[in-house]
Image: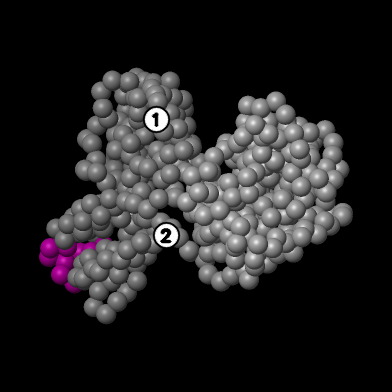
Amino acid sequence: MTSDSVHWTYALAADVRVEPGDGGIFLRTPTDEIWMEGAVEIRALELLASVDSSEAQLHARLRSGPDAGDAETRCAALLFQLDRLGLLSRTINSKERRLVSCVPLRPPPGPPPERPPDGPLRLSHRAHARVEAHVLVLELPGAWARIAIHDRDLFPLLHDLAVGRSASQVVVAGHSGQAILAVLALMDWCGLFGEPEADGWSGHDLLFHARTRRGYARVALGKTGFGAPPPDAMAIEGGDRVALEPPDLARLLLEDPPYALVSERRQSLRRQGSIAITSNQLSEFLFRTLHEQGGRRPYPSGGACYPLKAYLGIHQCSGVAPGLYAYSPTRHELVRLSEPGPRLDSLLSDAAAAASVERPPQILIVLAARFTRTQRVYGDLSYSLILKEVGAVFQAAMMAAAAMRLAACPLGCGNSLQFSELAGVDPLTETSVGEMMVGSIDDNV
């Protein structure tokens, strides 16, 4: 084998653990386990778990062991089986250098292509690059495997593939054409080439979807951490505290409209009345929507982590002075954080613009997430759960508003950095994830 030749080496994928058993060996992934037997197979698996090896290197090491007579045949069969199961990482080597590796996330759709496709090759607009374990990784979200680039001399290749080049036009200094063709074929196998940008999934949406749904990769989704969420480190500190009078539950049980009527009545109302909402109405609305009693709130939360914290930008409310407040769900009170001013006015104006109305809302409720409360329990699933929780709060709030005959309207987006500056919080620690306008109902409704 010359130094310019291209050869493959193999190893078990990084998420595969080898654990000895009675008479065999377990291959365990975050989602599955496979039992393997046979002296040759066990020895080969131990070698594949420790270092990249070519088939020739594996054969040489297996010849000295038991059952050496058919070691090469059994080794080839094992590599084929591991490859079909998506447990085998394969690396292209040339000039005694590792070039790229194909890192499987699930079983492949078929065998690797012998050569790259004809015509211009262009990286998919949905592909993304990131650093993982000190290596640059290329991946199309949702694809069965990703590419790890080991050799820095290959980086100009990414420029050519962003522009679009045929395989014969791609030249990388320091590497043979044979090596580059092998790299391009491997990238094609991993789904990295695509058509020009078109309608459909954006790259970040597809990544979010693939990382928070089962089946795309061997990852444990769900409750991966254990124990109760950490104590609320975001204790509400501020100025004046406004105690809210809890509603009369006995009265609500007698006078509340039936659920069927509330459900029928529920709708987003952007335009608010000329008379401001009262502090008693606000108290009842918050109690119905966000109040916490016995560790539970009126809406579901993954693992009862309750990462959401409500802030109120009050423009008009009879009985409560304008300003920015935080709501304490356990004490059912408002804590004043800041006076009215240009930043709050800007937040309220943005809300009005998002709802296509001219007047700022009487009250803007901002839901901010303390991410680590959920992340330490649910890992990659956390942000998806937080957004689902925002939807649950919106539904609870809309039903409460319908029952109380208030005007409420969830908003599609808000300015997280503007909110963080106003509230004085680190946006990477606590960030806004949902906004809703609330006020008295329009006089003409």
Q: CA distance from mark 2 to mark 1?
A: 27 Å
Q: Quadrant of residue 115?
A: top left
Label 2's element?
loop
Where residue 40 sits in the image (x, y, percent)?
21, 67
Q: Quick one: quadrant of the C terminus? A: top right
Q: Residue at x 78, y 33 (%)?
A: 345
Q: Quadrant of residue 240?
A: bottom right
Residue tagged 2: 220
- State left or right for residue 44 relative to residue 445: left
Give amino acid for label 1. Answer: Gly
> Along the polypeptide, which appears first: circle 2 or circle 1?
1
Q: Is residue 22 above or below residue 149?
A: below
- Extreme residue toward the left, this view: 69
Viewer-proximal residue among 379 and 321: 321
Viewer-proximal residue among 167 and 28: 28
Residue tagged 1: 200
- Extreme residue toward the bottom, this view: 22
Q: Which residues are magenta?
A: 61-71
Q: Quick one: quadrant of the N terminus? A: top left
- State left or right for residue 135 relative to residue 401: left
Determine if the magenta segment contains residue 114. no
Label 1's element?
loop
Give amino acid for label 2. Answer: Ala
